[in-house]
Amino acid sequence: MADATHILRVSPVIPVVTIDDPRHAVRVARALADGGVRIIELTLRTDSALESLKLIAGEVPEILLGAGTVLAPGQADAAVDAGAQFLVSPGVTPALLGHMLTLEVPILPGVATVGEVMAVLEQGLQAMKFFPAGPAGGPAYVAAIGAPIPHVQFCPTGGISPASAPDYLRLPNVSCVGGSWLTPRNAIENGDWKLITGLAQQAAALGVSP
Ligand SMILES: O=C[C@H](O)COP(=O)(O)O
Ligand SMILES: CC(=O)C(=O)O
């Protein structure tokens, strides 16, 4: 099933995580899960990303494991082989989208314009990443897309902070947001897993109504 609507309901925030040293991978995933965030989008931006995916897939079964920054069909295949349970791309091309649709995992293609939303919708997908959310227009832009196309659910990502996340999460066409703020690079390098767990707890609480 390619549609990722159910993936967007796992957590109010999908952490977008970049790990340089695979020895940190399991600790980062556990720190997020300990804070109540049981989903991770591990970017394929480092040479060791596939190794990190394999380690998390093998040792942290309680977290839903996605691969992000999928730019090419071969990367999508390699990520699934490494254990990715869903795939995220910052944008779409016909070749990449067509290939990802042949795989057995949910996909979250990135879109930034109404035309791109319509192109992805034509392929039968109703869940999309909106990227880069802040620079592309922010909550007002996402809300405006919802007028003609109310049945698409978005995960806005890019330039979002704990302060701005609620402005997106209150929109009817936003199920969650994505962000890198839960896993600061220096916290990973310093092994500050408590900080990451604390940031995850705050993020998980964004989904709880006051
Ligand atoms: O490339 C950006 C990541 O997808 C997340 O963006 P962010 O660092 O603004 O949260
Ligand atoms: C930014 C983004 O969407 C990605 O790295 O997949």
Image: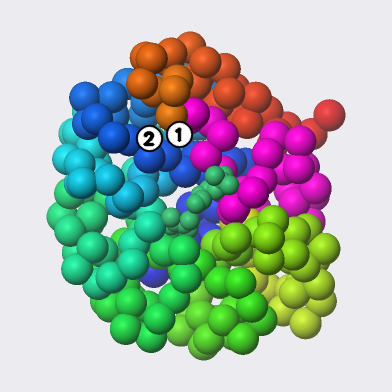
- The part of the chain drawn in magenta is 157-184
Residue at image position (66%, 45%) is: 160
Q: Secondary structure at mark 1?
A: loop
Q: Residues within 10 Å of mark 2 (few under 14, many from 20)?
A: some
SS for tag 2? Answer: loop
Q: Could you tell me the amino acid type at mark 1?
A: Arg
Query: What residue is at 37 percent from the left and 14 percent from the top?
Result: 191
Q: Which mark is residue 38?
A: 1
Q: Quadrant of ligand 2?
A: bottom left
Residue 196 picture location, percent across and down: 49, 21
The residue carrying mark 2 is 63
Does residue 173 show up?
Answer: no
Does residue 173 appear left or right of residue 110 in this picture? right
The residue at 52%/39% (across/down) is: 180
Q: Classify 182 as above or below 49.
A: above
Can residue 119 be seen from the camera position used here? yes
Q: Residue shown at 28%/70% (left/top)?
A: 72
